[in-house]
Image: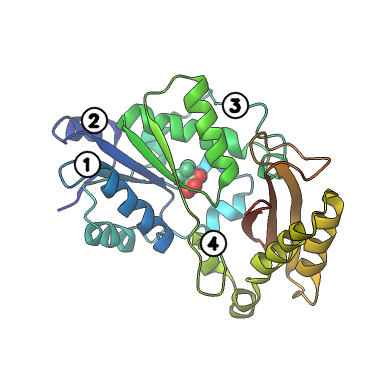
C-alpha cells in the first residue's frame, strides 16, 4: 500500500519508519513507461524489503517559459494509481508553497557542463533542476536516486553536484525508453497533435542517419551536423523547428572540433511549443 505525503515535515516523520535502503525516483509526474522502468530499477536496487520512493512535483523554477509550465500535464490521481500498481512505498507530492518560501533566494548553479545544449537555450533551467534535486535529496535522504539517460545533460550535472558537494547518494542512470517507432518517451509527447506524433520519429531517424556516417571514419563535426539537420528538416511539418543541434564531447559536454573521442549528437526540437529532446552516441 502506497503512503502519500504532501509536505516536508510529514514526509520526514514517515521516513523514520521506512526501511533503508531507500531509492528515489524524482519526477514531474505524467508518468509513462519510461518512469515505470525507473521505479522497477529502484525496486531492484533496494530489494523487496527496502523503500522505493517517488517524488511528483512540477517544479516551477526550472521552467523558462510560463506557457510550458501552464500546459505541463498533471494527472496526479492516475500517476498515484500507477505507482500503487508498481509497488511504490512512498509518494512525495509536495505543493509549491510547502517547498518554496515566497522569498526563496538560493539557487544551485553548475558552471561548466551547462554551457551548451539545453543549458544554453533554456536560461536558468538547470539552476532550477539542481535546486529542486538537492532539496529532494535533503528532505528524503535517499541512498540511491534514479534518472533517465534521455536527459543526459541533466544526469551529468546531477552527478557533478553529487561529486562536488559530497552528497551521500548514489546516482543511477537508466537507459532511454522508446516507443516502437523510435520516439523517446516523454511526458510532453501527449501534447503533440496527431500528425506531429506520427512525424516525431524523424528526430531519432535523423540522429541515426548522422551516426551511421561514423562508419566511414569521418572526423569533421560539420558533416554530422549537416546530415542530421538535413534529415530533421526534410519535408517537416510547418510547426517543426530546431532549437539546437550540437555535437559535444560525451564527458565534458563541450563542442568538439574533431570526432575522435566518444561524442553525443544531441538535439532539441519544437512541434509548436512542445519541445522534445534526444541524442545519440557516435561511438554507439
Ligand atoms: O527530469 C525531470 O523530470 C525533472 O527535471 C526532475 C529531475 C524531476 C527535477 O524536477
Ligand 1 closer than 8 Å to label 3 CB: no
Secondary structure at badge 2 equals helix
Q: Is residue 223 left or right of residue 86?
A: right
Q: Is residue 32 above or below residue 250?
A: below
Determine the CA span between mark 1 and mark 2: 14 Å
Q: Is residue 190 above or below residue 224?
A: below
Q: Are marks 1 and 4 in contact (CB under 8 Å)?
A: no
Q: Which residue is mark 2?
A: 12
Considering only order in the chain, which callout, 2 or 4, is on the residue closer to the N terminus?
Answer: 2
Q: Which residue is mark 3?
A: 109
Considering only order in the chain, which callout, 4 or 1, is on the residue closer to the N terminus?
Answer: 1
Q: Is residue 154 above or below residue 235?
A: above
Determine the CA span between mark 4 and mark 3: 25 Å
Q: Position of residue 224 (x, y in %)?
A: 80, 56
Residue 103 is at least partly visible in this image = no
Determine the CA span between mark 3 and mark 1: 30 Å
Q: Are marks 4 and 2 in contact (CB under 8 Å)?
A: no
Q: Position of residue 231 (x, y in %)?
A: 78, 69
Considering only order in the chain, which callout, 1 or 3, is on the residue closer to the N terminus?
Answer: 1
**Of residues 52 and 282, the one drawn nearer to the viewer in this rendering:** 282
Amino acid at each position: 500500500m502506497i503512503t502519500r505525503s504532501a509536505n516536508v515535515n510529514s514526509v520526514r516523520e514517515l521516513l523514520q519508519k521506512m526501511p533503508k535502503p531507500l531509492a528515489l525516483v524524482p519526477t514531474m509526474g505524467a508518468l509513462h513507461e519510461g518512469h515505470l522502468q525507473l521505479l522497477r530499477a529502484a525496486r531492484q536496487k533496494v530489494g523487496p524489503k527496502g523503500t522505493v520512493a517517488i517524488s511528483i512535483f512540477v517544479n516551477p523554477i526550472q521552467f523558462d517559459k510560463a506557457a510550458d509550465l501552464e500546459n505541463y500535464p498533471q494527472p496526479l490521481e492516475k500517476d498515484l494509481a500507477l505507482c500503487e500498481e508498481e509497488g511504490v512505498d512512498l509518494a512525495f507530492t509536495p505543493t509549491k508553497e510547502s517547498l518554496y518560501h515566497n522569498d526563496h533566494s538560493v539557487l544551485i548553479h553548475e558552471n561548466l557542463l551547462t554551457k551548451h545544449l539545453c543549458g544554453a537555450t533554456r536560461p536558468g533551467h538547470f539552476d532550477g533542476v539542481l535546486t529542486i534535486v538537492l532539496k529532494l535529496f535533503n528532505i528524503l535522504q535517499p541512498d540511491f536516486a534514479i534518472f533517465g539517460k534521455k536527459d543526459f545533460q541533466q544526469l551529468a550535472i546531477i552527478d557533478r553536484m553529487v561529486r562536488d558537494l559530497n552528497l551521500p547518494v548514489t546516482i543511477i542512470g537508466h537507459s532511454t525508453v522508446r516507443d516502437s517507432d523510435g520516439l523517446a518517451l516523454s511526458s510532453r509527447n501527449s501534447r503533440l497533435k496527431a500528425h506531429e506524433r506520427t512525424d516525431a520519429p524523424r528526430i531519432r531517424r535523423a540522429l541515426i542517419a548522422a551516426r551511421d556516417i561514423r562508419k566511414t571514419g569521418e572526423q569533421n563535426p560539420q558533416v554530422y551536423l549537416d546530415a542530421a539537420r538535413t534529415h530533421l528538416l526534410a519535408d517537416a511539418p510547418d510547426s517543426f523547428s530546431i532549437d539546437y543541434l550540437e555535437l559535444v564531447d560525451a564527458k565534458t559536454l563541450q563542442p568538439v572540433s574533431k570526432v575522435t573521442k566518444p561524442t553525443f549528437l544531441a538535439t532539441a526540437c519544437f512541434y509548436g511549443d512542445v519541445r522534445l529532446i534526444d541524442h545519440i552516441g557516435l561511438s554507439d
